[in-house]
Amino acid sequence: MMSRRRGFTLIELLVVIAIIALLLSILMPAMRKVKEQANMIKCMANLKQWNMIFALYLQENDGKFFSGDSSGGANDGFWWIAQMQPKEQSRIQNDLWFCPKTKGTRQEASGSVNQKTSIFTAWGIFTGSNITPDGIAGSYGINGWTLGVPATGAALSEGRTRAWHWRSPQVKEAAYIPLMAEALRFDLWPLENQAPAASEEAEWSGTNHMARTCINRHIGHLNVAMCDFSARKVGLKELYTLKWHRNFNTRGQWTQAGGVTGEAWPDWIRPFKDY
């Protein structure tokens, strides 16, 4: 006599489901960590490629960095992208502009502003004089203090000081001078007294240049290319210890050496490592 095949009881099914749920709860954080590491590596690879682009430009221009679009006679570093080759400018032809975590752009191709922005939104899309018709957009910004603005001339906008510009990577502090970093703008002029954004999603507001790069893209870190053409992972609070411009105090008020306390940091950045 053949025995009847026995199926799972409800309790057995619930036990199996519970085991699967437990395994997923253990595996998911590990999988997210692996995915984040892959994003970090790809993002850093982009910056290493940018280092090569900058090195080639310097080679062809007497070791001097970009000075900006001179069509208006300013040479103040603004629109430095205009001095790049059209293919390098293009958001379509040059995917090195984008961190793999990028989702959408701040400004749509139609010119309207995207209201659903976050720290993972790319700046752009920009077009204009001496800019590729494809438009420019991206996830990275140059340290504006590296740009080759003339040593003398009219006062620069936003209180920038001409003497603070590096103009060339041929300086002893090169390994600690940011060249390009993940950012919400294609150019940055950070100052040591500029606080992080009050909330994690508020970095788009105002003209706080440090807040434009102090963004939580990679769990308390972001990638930065340095003037010695290296690229590395940098802690968000560590940004205040880098030598952004010639007069930047790397022991300023937002560093441990400068006496910063945990309570001074906005809630979103407070748990991350101090420097």
Image: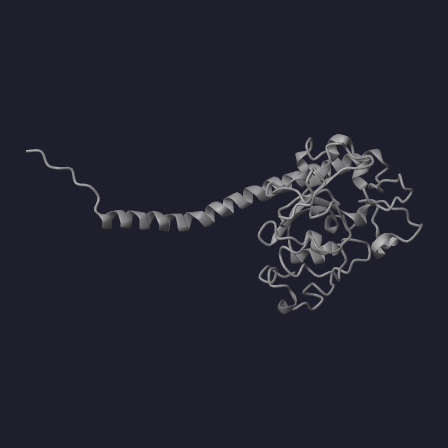
Q: Residue furthest right?
A: 153
Residue 65, how many percent across, how many down? 82, 41
The one nearer the camera, 174 or 201, is: 201
Residue 242 showing in the rendered view:
no
**Residue ID at (31%, 48%):** 17
**Residue ID at (85%, 36%):** 61
The one nearer the camera, 144 or 51, is: 144
Is 163 situated above or below 70?
below
Residue 115 showing in the rendered view:
yes
Q: Residue furthest left?
A: 1
Residue 9 located left or right of residue 45: left
Q: Where does the C terminus fall, quadrant-wise?
A: bottom right
Q: Where does the N terminus fall, quadrant-wise?
A: top left
**Residue ID at (83%, 33%):** 60
Q: How is the image coloured?
A: one colour
How many numbered markers are drawn?
0
Residue 19 located left or right of residue 57: left
Q: Quadrant of residue 8?
A: top left
Residue 219 located left or right of residue 9: right
Residue 103 located left or right of residue 82: left
Residue 41, how many percent across, how many down? 59, 42
Residue 23, how many percent across, how many down? 37, 48
Residue 238, how many percent across, how many down? 67, 56
**Residue ID at (90%, 53%):** 155
Is 86 situated above or below 179?
above
